[in-house]
Image: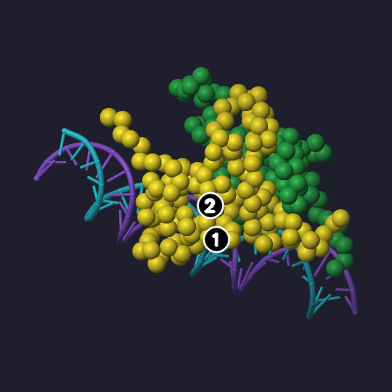
Chain colours: A yellow, B green, C cyan, D purple
Amino acid sequence: MTARPPPDTRAGPGLGPNDRAVLAVLADAKGPLGAYEVLDQVRHHGLKAPPQVYRALHRLIGLGLAHRIESLNAFVACAHGRHSDAVRADRAMFVICDRCGAAVELDATPAAAAAESAATAKGFRVGRVIVEMKGLCAGCTAEAPGPG
Amino acid sequence: MTARPPPDTRAGPGLGPNDRAVLAVLADAKGPLGAYEVLDQVRHHGLKAPPQVYRALHRLIGLGLAHRIESLNAFVACAHGRHSDAVRADRAMFVICDRCGAAVELDATPAAAAAESAATAKGFRVGRVIVEMKGLCAGCTAEAPGPG
DNA sequence: GAGCTGTCTGTTATCTTATAACATATCTCT
DNA sequence: AGAGATATGTTATAAGATAACAGACAGCTC
């Protein structure tokens, strides 16, 4: 196995046309999209079947250009375009508004550190850390009735 | 609506036969079970269809007797039998071994506090907090090859 | 006890999410 | 051209979840 030059994992290029179409749809979306919603939006690009979308999503996630929101079985474009030193792709955290469906990406570093600390204390070696919160965003909190 | 006496939300009673069957299966399981795996295990109790299992699961989760692991689309019995003052049911955290499939429940309070702090700083009102970690458990770390 | 109401239960059908498996194309290096 | 790797297209199916309707049963009121 000769060490091939890696096919440019930088943001824009290095992606196939399917990847770019899927990423564009995610980036345009107002909130998280299910894989089949993405599929609907990329049909005019010629994509027709779920595996095409899922493959693109898996690649984008691998490159840190998109995230999967586990509690929604849905996907979003990464808010940073691409993760750099400060924020690791596997240390993103989401707050999800139950009312308007918005998902905001925040830096999970402090929360992930606390979680990881508890896990390593038990001898666990931590890979990915998933942190997701459900509740009401600022706008919906203002509009919605509620305690205090 | 007259205020009925609530049907005893304590651990044991207050549950229907289906709930108890499902809870027993989860409690016996070595790891998280998918809803259809639970269904297979409760067929000899007469349960035949997915909605029966899902209904029981939703009730158990509502009572804090079981948890849903979002990243696995699977379910576990609560490690505490039932949550008391110290550990809120919606503040449980799981570490999931990618190798042996074990899921260990830990107190998410510190991690959840850090996460919630970041969210409330953005004006978000937090309901449920989901913290899940993927990696290798102590046993599998010992056996598996790896850095370090 | 007839009738109402609410909860739990059973059952069918369907919807959503995700992947396996296989075929085809494309690119690069030699 | 031929070999190997990567990306893509396509069909079928697995896996997860719920909608919608029907029946059973308890407690209550009149």
Q: Residues within 10 Å of mark 2 (few under 14, many from 20)?
A: many
Q: Identity of the amino acid at label 1? A: Ala
**Location of residue A17 by image quarter:** bottom left
Decide: marks 1, 2 in contact (CB < 8 A)?
Answer: yes
Which chain is disc 1 placed on?
Answer: A
Q: Residues within 10 Å of mark 1 (few under 14, many from 20)?
A: few
Tell whether B59 sits left or right of C4.
left
Q: Which residue is at a point 59% across and 58% down the rendered structure image?
A: A31
Q: Which residue is mark 1?
A: A29
Q: Which residue is at a point 43% across and 46% down the rendered structure image?
A: A59
Callout 2 secondary element? strand
**Location of residue D25 by image quarter:** bottom right
Query: From where the camera sits, is residue B52 visible?
Result: yes
Q: Identity of the amino acid at label 2? A: Ala
Q: Which residue is mark 2?
A: A77
x%, y% of residue B114? 73, 38
x%, y% of residue C12? 50, 68
Q: Quadrant of the N terminus of chain B?
A: bottom right
x%, y% of residue B58? 66, 53
**Location of residue B90 by image quarter:** top right
Question: Which disc, if any, is residue B23?
Answer: none
Tell whether B145 sits left or right of B16.
left
Query: From where the camera sits, is residue B81 visible?
Result: no
Q: Are marks 1 and 2 on the same chain?
A: yes
Q: Earlier in the sequence, mark 1 or mark 2?
A: 1
Give the vertical position of B2 relative to B71 (above or below): below
Task: Determine the CA span between mark 1 and mark 2.
Answer: 9 Å
